[in-house]
């Protein structure tokens, strides 16, 4: 049964949810403050640029036609700019004759020129002609002065309509809004054409229709002779705009004459001519395609919904699925914003919801990452005392391999104990520092051996070490590693004894000779975090553990340093020479358990003789005087003590 610290888990969940709530509120406050910055507004407008042009909309049908004062016209007419106004008069006459509905001259005619030319243009204009005016605000430290340049009075007296062609640019120099002039150039075009709405959509966002030269465009010189140079009825019932429009749109870094950046500039890097911008404004007014910005309550509601969605996304946890969900949510914000512009002509900037969502999700992910790092450090600190650094690294990189609570696993369990250490402790009872130092010098190399062989140290019991293999990480060769560790522990004890002997010789005393017994058993156990809800240890328990402890205690009764259980012996028999020593009944078991040890100096003949010896021992036909004892002791030197103990035990039982 697994142990679960439910109160602790509940506290962690409450703490996480409280942190998420604080993060969400902090995000709302931070975005409220950031939205007051001019840079924030420009970022929102830049998002408008992308979303309003992502589907590459084109001019509505039946829109204006542009007569461009462009490079071919400058070359064909071969006259110094500004051209004579009589030429413009000729153009107006030709356009009217070609059926133009309204003619807009995006050319400032505010100053008198040659009287004959002025008279010619005055005779040509009428109520179907809109002439451009300009309005400029000049600010000085002393005052602000608004200067309006309008066409010559005789032109307006002749019936021409004045329209202010000035445009307002955003803080980044991009044209995005319908000018707030009631007598704007495009507004006057719409009024004269009879398509103006009752209320002009001033200061609304413009819907752009493609990059430069997206409108039907002909050169000025072609419009002077439309019958010969243009298709029939090309200008019939159309609104015609005349203005400067270079055939190759200037690059944004080079600037241009009467050319401006528009939302499409983010894609093309090119400016759009002023006359095309007037055409765009006209189509926005005519077709009702301008876009209103959402009011503050709507924006705040969208940001709040985004925060709630983000909190729901990370309510339980964060992981790779969080990234997928977040990507889908951010795409959804952009899609909803774009749909709002297309279907309802309302722009709700996705910037606020996007920043809010990212702040909550990735803020919580950062907290979770820090918490995970802290948990990894705790795992490292906790297990570094018990298992090898390699295993600690594996656990910290993949904590899922560590299953908290209890689970049933097959383990190889090792118990080691220093024989006669009680006597040594009694000798050193008046020198606790030396006794403590001796214990540390003993347990340190033995612990290193266990961890170097992939074992987990369960606990220290005085001079005794309990360790196991195959938990918390899988170890397919756990029995072999446990046996290798036990043999390495014997070597470590021998090294320590040599050091103690050398030190005792230097100070003229007698050395403390350390001898160790080890018991190893392999079998099914329960392993996990065991203890109370306030304190627990990673440990194992079960009958197999008890047998390993009994084997360690019984090893001295057989004169060997290592005693193995039956399953352990079977698993390591392919690597080491294991021999059976006896069959014993341990406490809690009714069936005799065979015990084994590892020998290094026995040939096949000696091993066969040992098996014969065991057969005689088990059948009761072995006598103390049997010469097999002497032969076996000579052929298997590692079991000399064992044979002597068995002979003495047999002789003692015979005397009884």
Image (tube, grey):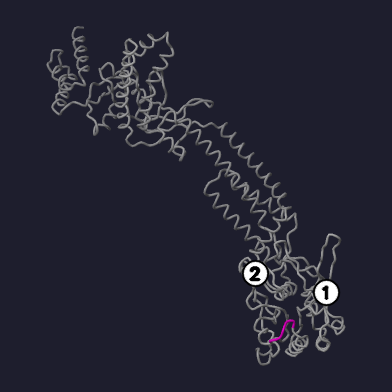
Q: Nearer the viewer, residue 23 or 384?
A: 384
Q: Residue at x 43, y 14 (%)?
A: 433
Quadrant hosting residue 231 = bottom right
Picture quadrant where residue 14 is located: top right
Position of residue 610 measured from the top left corner of the image (x, y, whole percent):
17, 23
Tag 2 secondary structure:
loop
Classify 10 Å Cα crowding around label 1: few (below 14), some (14-19), many (20 and above).
some
Sequence order check, earlier mark of 1 and 2:
1
Q: Looking at the image, can residue 222 be seen? A: no
Residue drawn at (20%, 14%) of the image = 644
Q: Residue furthest top?
A: 656
Q: Which residue is mark 2?
A: 254
Residue 81 in magenta? yes
The picture places residue 586, in percent across and down from the top left corner, at 31, 19
Is 414 drawn above or below residue 268 in the view shown?
A: above
Between the residue at mark 1 and the residue at mark 2, the CA separation in whole angstroms equals 27 Å
Q: Is residue 509 left or right of residue 163?
A: left
Q: Please identify the residue farthest to the bottom as the structure is shown.
A: 228
Which stretch is magenta?
78-82
In the picture provided, is 537 more to the left or to the right than 76? left
Q: Nearer the viewer, residue 567 or 449?
A: 449
What secondary structure is the stretch in magenta mostly built from? loop
The residue that mark 1 highlights is 149
């Amino acid at each position: 049964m697994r142990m679960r610290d439910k109160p602790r888990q509940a506290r962690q969940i409450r703490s996480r949810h409280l942190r998420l709530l604080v993060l969400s509120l902090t995000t709302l406050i931070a975005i409220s403050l950031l939205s007051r910055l001019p840079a924030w507004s420009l970022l929102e407008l830049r998002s408008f640029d992308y979303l309003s042009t992502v589907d590459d909309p084109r001019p509505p049908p039946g829109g204006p036609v542009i007569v461009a004062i462009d490079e071919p016209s400058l070359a064909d007419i071969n006259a110094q700019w500004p051209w004579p106004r009589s030429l413009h008069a000729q153009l107006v006459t030709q356009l009217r004759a070609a059926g133009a509905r309204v003619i807009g001259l995006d050319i400032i005619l505010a100053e008198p020129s040659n009287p004959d030319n002025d008279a010619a243009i005055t005779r040509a204009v009428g109520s179907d002609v809109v002439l451009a005016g300009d309005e400029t605000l000049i600010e000085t430290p002393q005052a602000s002065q608004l200067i309006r340049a309008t066409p010559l009075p005789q032109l307006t007296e002749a019936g021409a309509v004045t329209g202010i062609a000035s445009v307002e640019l955003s803080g980044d120099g991009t044209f995005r809004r319908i000018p707030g002039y009631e007598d704007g150039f495009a507004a006057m075009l719409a009024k004269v054409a009879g398509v103006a709405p009752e209320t002009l959509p001033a200061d609304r966002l413009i819907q752009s229709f493609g990059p430069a030269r997206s409108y039907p465009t002909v050169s000025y010189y072609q419009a002077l002779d439309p019958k010969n140079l243009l298709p029939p009825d090309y200008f019939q019932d159309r609104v015609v705009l005349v203005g400067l429009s270079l055939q190759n749109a200037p690059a944004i870094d080079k600037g241009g004459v009467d050319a401006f950046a528009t939302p499409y500039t983010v894609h093309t890097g090119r400016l759009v001519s002023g006359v095309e911008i007037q055409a765009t404004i006209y189509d926005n007014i005519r077709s009702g395609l301008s876009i209103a910005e959402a009011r503050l309550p709507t924006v705040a509601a969208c940001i709040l919904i985004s925060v709630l969605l983000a909190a729901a996304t990370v309510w339980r946890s964060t992981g790779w699925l969080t990234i997928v969900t977040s990507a889908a949510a951010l795409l959804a914000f952009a899609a909803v914003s774009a749909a709002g512009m297309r279907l309802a002509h309302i722009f709700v900037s996705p910037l606020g919801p996007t920043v809010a969502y990212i702040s909550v999700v990735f803020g919580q992910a950062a907290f979770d990452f820090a918490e995970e790092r802290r948990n990894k450090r705790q795992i490292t600190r906790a297990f570094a005392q018990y298992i090898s650094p390699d295993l600690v690294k594996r656990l910290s990189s993949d904590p899922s391999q560590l299953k908290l609570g209890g689970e049933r696993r097959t383990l190889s369990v090792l118990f080691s104990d220093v024989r006669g250490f009680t006597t040594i402790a009694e000798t050193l009872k008046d020198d606790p520092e030396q006794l403590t130092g001796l214990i540390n010098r003993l347990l340190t190399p033995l612990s290193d051996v266990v961890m170097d062989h992939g074992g987990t140290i369960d606990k220290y019991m005085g001079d005794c070490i309990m360790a196991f293999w195959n938990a918390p990480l899988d170890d397919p060769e756990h029995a072999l590693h446990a046996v290798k560790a036990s043999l390495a522990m014997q070597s470590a004890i021998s090294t320590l004894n040599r050091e103690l002997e050398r030190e005792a010789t230097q100070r003229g005393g007698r050395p403390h000779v350390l001898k160790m017994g080890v018991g190893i058993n392999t079998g099914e156990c329960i392993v996990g975090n065991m203890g109370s809800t306030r304190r627990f240890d990673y440990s194992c328990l079960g009958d197999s553990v008890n047998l390993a402890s009994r084997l360690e205690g019984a090893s001295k009764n057989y004169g060997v340093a290592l005693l193995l259980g039956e399953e352990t012996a079977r698993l390591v028999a392919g690597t080491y020479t294991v021999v059976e020593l006896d069959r014993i009944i341990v406490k809690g078991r009714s069936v005799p358990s065979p015990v084994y040890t590892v020998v290094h100096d026995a040939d096949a003949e000696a091993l066969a003789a040992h098996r014969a010896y065991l057969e005689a021992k088990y059948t009761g036909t072995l006598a103390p005087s049997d010469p097999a004892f002497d032969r076996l002791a000579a052929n298997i030197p590692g079991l000399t003590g064992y044979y002597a103990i068995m002979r003495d035990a047999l002789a003692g039982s015979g005397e009884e």
